Image: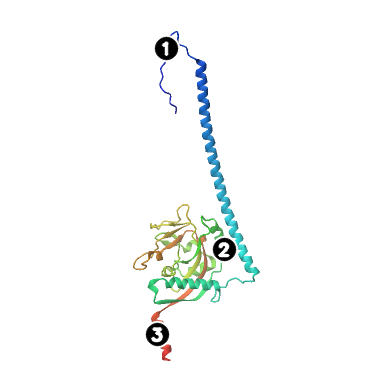
């Protein structure tokens, strides 16, 4: 839209002495046209440069993601090569394996931190190592590397299997699937907790599944929604208050927190821990019994 100020030629048009300088008017129009064209060209150049910068930044981000994935693969290959050069054998998940010892100790430490269990001691009796095929591991690794934040991975406990214990054996042999999804109050997915006590209350007594979970870019969600089947755009998982978020059960609400993932390829099963518990009174009776002999 253009604005032309009002003007009037009055009665001067009919005046014999009135003289219109046509050349001057044409020069002014030409000058106005040139200025308008220059302003348009400046705006066009600005928009073109802006578009070019956006394309360049997007290309750069994509390239950096590819470099991160390549470096991650190279690091894993280097670690594997170093182990082979050192003559190290693959970790065997038995009572003598260092890797198992760490997970066993972490499990017992997590259970000891739960105030309600102060008088109860937990002992891991055995473990079944996850025995997945190379194809399954590659699929999981590929999925994790394609996430928003592929480096955010952590060992957690699976909060499931309470109503289908037979699935636990299948998970450590073939990995997670949508059959293992829980129809929870925060959505339909796989629920995990960094707190062992929370997971134990939602798992088969005496059994707890340990997994390496890629939570990626996690979104904190407080709203319950059983129909939720994916995280919000730009996120890889959700962090929720937990299905056991009750002051009577967990005075510290953070203990009951759970992570929910919506792809079975975001979690890699590590092993199935078998444990038993004993109370302080049991140990006292045992000590008295030995003393009497």
The residue located at (51%, 18%) in the rendering is 24
Residue of label 3: 285
Q: Position of residue 35 (x, y in %)?
A: 51, 27
Gap in angstroms between the C-alphas marked 3 and 2: 48 Å
N-terminal label among 3 and 2 = 2
N-terminal label among 3 and 1 = 1
Q: Nearer the viewer, mark 3 or mark 1?
A: 1
**58 in relation to 268, above or below:** above
Residue 172 seen in this snapshot: yes
Residue of label 1: 12
User: Residue lying farthest right?
Assistant: 85
Q: Position of residue 264 (x, y in %)?
A: 50, 61
Is the C-beta separation of discs 2 and 1 under 8 Å? no
The residue located at (42%, 86%) in the rendering is 287
Gap in angstroms between the C-alphas marked 3 and 1: 124 Å
**6 in relation to 197, above or below:** above
Q: Secondary structure at mark 2?
A: helix
Q: Position of residue 44 (x, y in %)?
A: 53, 35
Residue of label 2: 137
The residue located at (58%, 51%) in the rendering is 63
Q: Nearer the viewer, mark 2 or mark 1?
A: 1
- Is residue 284 toward the left or the right of residue 216 in the image? left
Dot 2 crowding, Cα within 10 Å, few <14, some 14–19, many 20+: some
User: Residue lying farthest left?
Assistant: 248
Determine the image quadrant of residue 114. bottom left
Is the C-beta separation of discs 3 and 1 under 8 Å? no
Q: Secondary structure at mark 3?
A: helix
Residue 204 seen in this snapshot: no
Dot 3 crowding, Cα within 10 Å, few <14, some 14–19, many 20+: few
Q: Secondary structure at mark 1?
A: helix
Dot 1 crowding, Cα within 10 Å, few <14, some 14–19, many 20+: few
């Amino acid at each position: 839209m253009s604005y032309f100020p009002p003007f009037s030629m009055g009665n001067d048009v009919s005046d014999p002495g009135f003289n219109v300088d046509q050349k001057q008017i044409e020069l002014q129009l030409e000058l106005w046209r040139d200025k308008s064209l220059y302003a348009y060209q400046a705006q066009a150049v600005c928009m073109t440069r802006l578009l070019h910068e956006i394309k360049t930044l997007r290309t750069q981000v994509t390239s950096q993601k590819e470099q991160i994935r390549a470096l991650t693969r190279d690091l894993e290959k280097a670690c594997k090569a170093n182990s082979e050069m050192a003559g190290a054998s693959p970790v065997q998940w038995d009572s003598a394996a260092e890797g198992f010892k760490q997970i066993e100790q972490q499990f017992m430490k997590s259970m000891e931190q739960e105030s309600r269990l102060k008088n109860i001691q937990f002992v891991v009796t055995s473990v079944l190592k996850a025995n997945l095929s190379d194809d399954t591991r590659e699929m999981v690794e590929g999925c994790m590397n394609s996430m928003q934040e592929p480096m955010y991975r952590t060992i957690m406990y699976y909060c499931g299997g309470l109503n289908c214990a037979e699935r636990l054996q299948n998970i450590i042999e073939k990995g997670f699937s949508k059959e293992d999804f829980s129809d929870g109050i925060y959505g339909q997915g796989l629920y995990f907790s960094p707190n062992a006590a929370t997971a134990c209350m939602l798992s088969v007594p005496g059994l707890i599944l340990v997994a390496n979970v890629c939570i990626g870019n996690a979104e904190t969600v407080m709203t319950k929604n059983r129909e939720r089947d994916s995280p919000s755009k730009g996120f890889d998982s959700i962090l929720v208050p937990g299905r056991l978020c009750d002051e009577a059960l967990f005075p510290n609400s953070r203990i009951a927190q759970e992570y929910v993932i919506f792809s079975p390829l975001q979690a890699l099963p590590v092993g199935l821990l078998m444990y038993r518990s004993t109370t302080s009174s049991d140990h006292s009776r045992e000590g008295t019994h030995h003393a009497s002999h």
